[in-house]
Structures are given as structure tokens and as C-alpha cells.
């Protein structure tokens, strides 16, 4: 991007985050260059539960290991309690059964809690580590390092697969993990059956699912929301992480809101992607 367009993107990030506590980062998918940022130190150093933003990496591990057929449909069961934690799905009650793509789009906790049990604790941890969720992104100097616990039992495995316990990451680590997904997309990984459900699910999340607040006319976006409670209180924070254009990604965006949920973060991201879409039309 040229200097003028970078300035427009930076202005869009500041407008989107006005009056909000949190962080926002936009990076070039190919080079990794940070194009715009709000509270970059916060994004690089605060460790947080990532919520449902980890689900694509759990799904990829299940598909790659052959432990899940992407076309298999599972019933969404409500209410959902895992141990003593209430984890009811937030998607519409009219969605009663889902395949892998739809489970990502609607961020179905019931689906992921069920299929995660097909992984061992070591396999889950390896999947999250392979995504880069406990290693610095390399996008800035002196980043904090995420923490991934080895689940001690089935309950903790399910909660960790939902990003609600046993894992803490920085917003920059999430940005780096989704940048790697975007690079795979650019290499044509979506042509493979294994990756197809993950990439399609991220696109449908914005098109009609839980990240629909991000949707921008004229640009196909792929992304995922995440909501989790802090360690200190029941107050939730929200994430959105995604990339665009979905067909051949150029930018990757991470939004963290200290108070709120993933849907709120998706709404903030919309302003950033709208500016990027305007820049593309002006080329």
C-alpha cells in the first residue's frame, strides 16, 4: 500500500476504536508489515483467553488426522455445561444440526465440545502450538509469549478447545496465526478437501454467521469472533480476527475489546475493512 492509503487505513483504525478500550492491528499478509495499529503494546503484551478464535485450528487438526469427516452433521445440544461452566451456544436456536463449515460459521460450542474429544490432550496442544499460539508473531520486538496448558482431563480438554480455559494468547499471536491461514489460502490450500471446510467456514462466518457485523459490500471477508471471560471477573472481552479479500488475502486484522464480545469486535473491524475496500477500488 502507498503512504496515502496507509494513512487512510490508520485513520480508519483510530475511528473504529474511538471511545473503546482495547487494541487493533492491521498487517500485510505477504510481508507481515504492520500497516496500522491502535495500542500495539497492549496487543503485544496482554495475555488473554482467546475464546472461539481457536476453533479453526482445532478443526484443521481433526480433519488432517482423519478423525472427523467435514460433511458429518452433529446436533447442537442445549443447554451445554462442561464441568461447572455454562457454555451455551450463541447462534440462533433454529440452527439445530451442523457440518464442519457451518460449525465454524455459527461458532457452535456444542459441535466443538463433542468433536474435540476425538483428540488427545497432546494432539490438541500440538495443534494450538503449530498455529503459533504460544510463540511470538515476530511482528514487533519483545512480545509476550502465550501459554497453553496440557489438559488434565476431558473437561479441561473441551474447555481449552473452546478457548475458554487452559490457553492465553496475545492479540498479535492471534494475528500471526490468522496471517498463516491467509498465506495458506493464497497458496491454494482451499482446493484441498481438508482446508476447504475451514476456509469456507471463515467466509460464511462473515457472510451470514457470528461475524456478520464485519460484512462490507464489495469485499469478501473471512474471519472469526471470540468471546471469553477474564481470569479476574465474569466480565467478557471480545476478539475478531480475519483477512481480506477472502479469495486472495492482502490484509489481516485483529481487534481486541477489553469489554464486550466477539460480535462487538466484529462491528469494529467493519470500519477497517471498509477503508481497505475503498482503497482497493481506488487503485
Image (cartoon, rainbow, N blue to C red):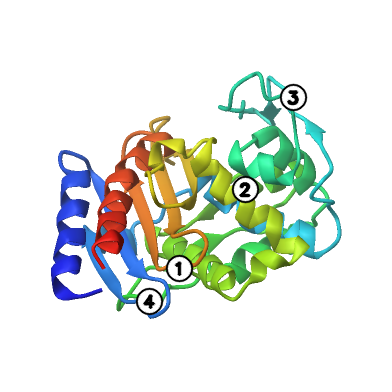
Residue labelled with disc 2: 201
Q: Is residue 154 above or below residue 185?
A: above
Q: Nearer the viewer, mark 4 or mark 1?
A: 4
- The residue tagged with tag 1: helix, strand or loop? helix
Q: CA distance from mark 4 to mark 1?
A: 8 Å
- Assess whether mark 2 and mark 4 are in contact (beta carbons under 8 angstroms): no
Image quadrant holding the C terminus, namely bottom left
Judge from the rendering whether residue 257 lies leftward or rightward of residue 228; answer left or right: left
Q: Specify the label residue 32 is tagged with.
A: 4
Q: Specify the label residue 198 is tagged with.
A: none
The residue under the point 82% across, 46% down is 71
Image quadrant holding the N terminus, namely bottom left
Q: Is residue 255 above or below residue 210?
A: below
Residue labelled with disc 3: 77
Mark positioned earlier in the residue sequence (4 or 1): 4
Q: Nearer the viewer, mark 4 or mark 3?
A: 4
Mark positioned earlier in the residue sequence (4 or 2): 4
Q: CA distance from mark 4 to mark 2?
A: 24 Å
Residue labelled with disc 1: 176
Amino acid at each position: 500500500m502507498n503512504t496515502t492509503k496507509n494513512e487512510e487505513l490508520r485513520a480508519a483504525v483510530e475511528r473504529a476504536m474511538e471511545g473503546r478500550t482495547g487494541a487493533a492491528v492491521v498487517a500485510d499478509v505477504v510481508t507481515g508489515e504492520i500497516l496500522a495499529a491502535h495500542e500495539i503494546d497492549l496487543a503485544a503484551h496482554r495475555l488473554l483467553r482467546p475464546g472461539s478464535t481457536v476453533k479453526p485450528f482445532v478443526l484443521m487438526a481433526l480433519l488432517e488426522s482423519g478423525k472427523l469427516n467435514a460433511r458429518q452433521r452433529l446436533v447442537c445440544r442445549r443447554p451445554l455445561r462442561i464441568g461447572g461452566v455454562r457454555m451455551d451456544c450463541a447462534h440462533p436456536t433454529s440452527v439445530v444440526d451442523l457440518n464442519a463449515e457451518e460449525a465454524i460459521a455459527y461458532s457452535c460450542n456444542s459441535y466443538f465440545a463433542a468433536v474435540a474429544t476425538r483428540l488427545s490432550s497432546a494432539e490438541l496442544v500440538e495443534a494450538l502450538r503449530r498455529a503459533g499460539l504460544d510463540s511470538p508473531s515476530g511482528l514487533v520486538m519483545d512480545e509476550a509469549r502465550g501459554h497453553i496448558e496440557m489438559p488434565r482431563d476431558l473437561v479441561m480438554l473441551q474447555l481449552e478447545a473452546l478457548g475458554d480455559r487452559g490457553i492465553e494468547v496475545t492479540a498479535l499471536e492471534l494475528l500471526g496465526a490468522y496471517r498463516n491461514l491467509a498465506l495458506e489460502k493464497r497458496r491454494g490450500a482451499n482446493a484441498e478437501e481438508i482446508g476447504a471446510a475451514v476456509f469456507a467456514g471463515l467466509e460464511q462466518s462473515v457472510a451470514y454467521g457470528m461475524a456478520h457485523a464485519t460484512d462490507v459490500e464489495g469485499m469478501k471477508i473471512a474471519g472469526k469472533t471470540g468471546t471469553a471471560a477474564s481470569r479476574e471477573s465474569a466480565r467478557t472481552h471480545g476478539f475478531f480476527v480475519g483477512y481480506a479479500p477472502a479469495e486472495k488475502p492482502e490484509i489481516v486484522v485483529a481487534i481486541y475489546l477489553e469489554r464486550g464480545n466477539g460480535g462487538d469486535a466484529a462491528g469494529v473491524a467493519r470500519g477497517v475493512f471498509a477503508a481497505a475496500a475503498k482503497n482497493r477500488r481506488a487503485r
